[in-house]
Image: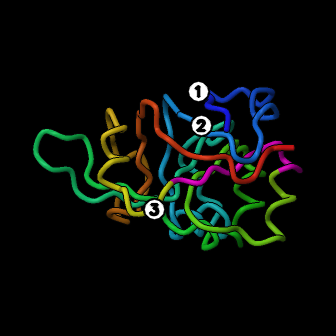
Amino acid sequence: MRKIKLNTPIERDELKQLEAGDMVFVSGEIFTARDAVHHLIVCEGEIPIDLNDRIIYYAGPAPAPPGHPIGSIGPTTSSRMDVYTEEILKVGVAVTIGKGPRSDDVKPIYAKYGALHLSALGGVGALLATKVKSAEVVAFSHLGPEAVYRLVVEDFPAIVSIPAK
């Protein structure tokens, strides 16, 4: 297993070098988005932030405890976003992060758009929260924990599960 540092903003050529099974440590800016946000973007055409060459983390954080930027922030099941994946990648998203398997129909879509999917470990949301240096709601605040959060992360761990090639 290779250990790779991946910094934002994303360089698409760098993504093509990553292989399934590579351990990735993401540093920089990522955005959270779950089912409700995907629906608003794909079905309602609401795109409140620039998603070009961005990372979307399928997560809805718990409230921040005192002295911390965010509460537990474990990944959401990726397959719940399968129906939206092509449209999300079409608007420019470069990387998605979630947990669990993806459907066979979704896998070739990542190669089509030169994007990749990372798997984060479920059940360790409190540990993943320690990798978040700052967090702010940037869109759809009415959705509460399903709002879009802009996270600044350092060495956020994930594994390449669907490569960009």
Q: Which residues are magenta?
A: 111-120
* Label 3 sits on residue: 122
Q: Quadrant of the rendered structure where residue 144 is? A: bottom left
Q: Earlier in the sequence, mark 2 or mark 3?
A: 2
Residue 98: x and y in percent read 56, 58
Considering only order in the chain, which callout, 1 or 2, is on the residue closer to the N terminus? 1
Q: Residue at x 61, y 61 (%)?
A: 41
**Residue 114, numbered circle:** none
Picture residue at 75% right of the left edge, 27% below the top: 14
- Residue 68, image x and y in percent? 19, 41
Counting from the top left corner in percent of width and height, residue 54 is at 62, 39
The residue to which callout 2 is attached is 24
Quarter of the figure that contains the N terminus: top right
User: Which residue in the structure is indicated by mark 1?
Assistant: 5
Q: Residue at x 52, y 53 (%)?
A: 120
* Quadrant assignment, res 145: bottom left
Tag 2 secondary structure: strand
Looking at the picture, which amino acid does disc 1 mark?
Lys
Report the front residue among 50 and 149.
Answer: 149
Where disc 3 sits, the SS reads loop
Q: Amino acid at mark 2?
A: Val
Mark 2 residue crowding within 10 angstroms, few (<14) / some (14–19) / many (20+): many
| Distance between the alpha carbons at the discs numbered 2 and 1 | 6 Å
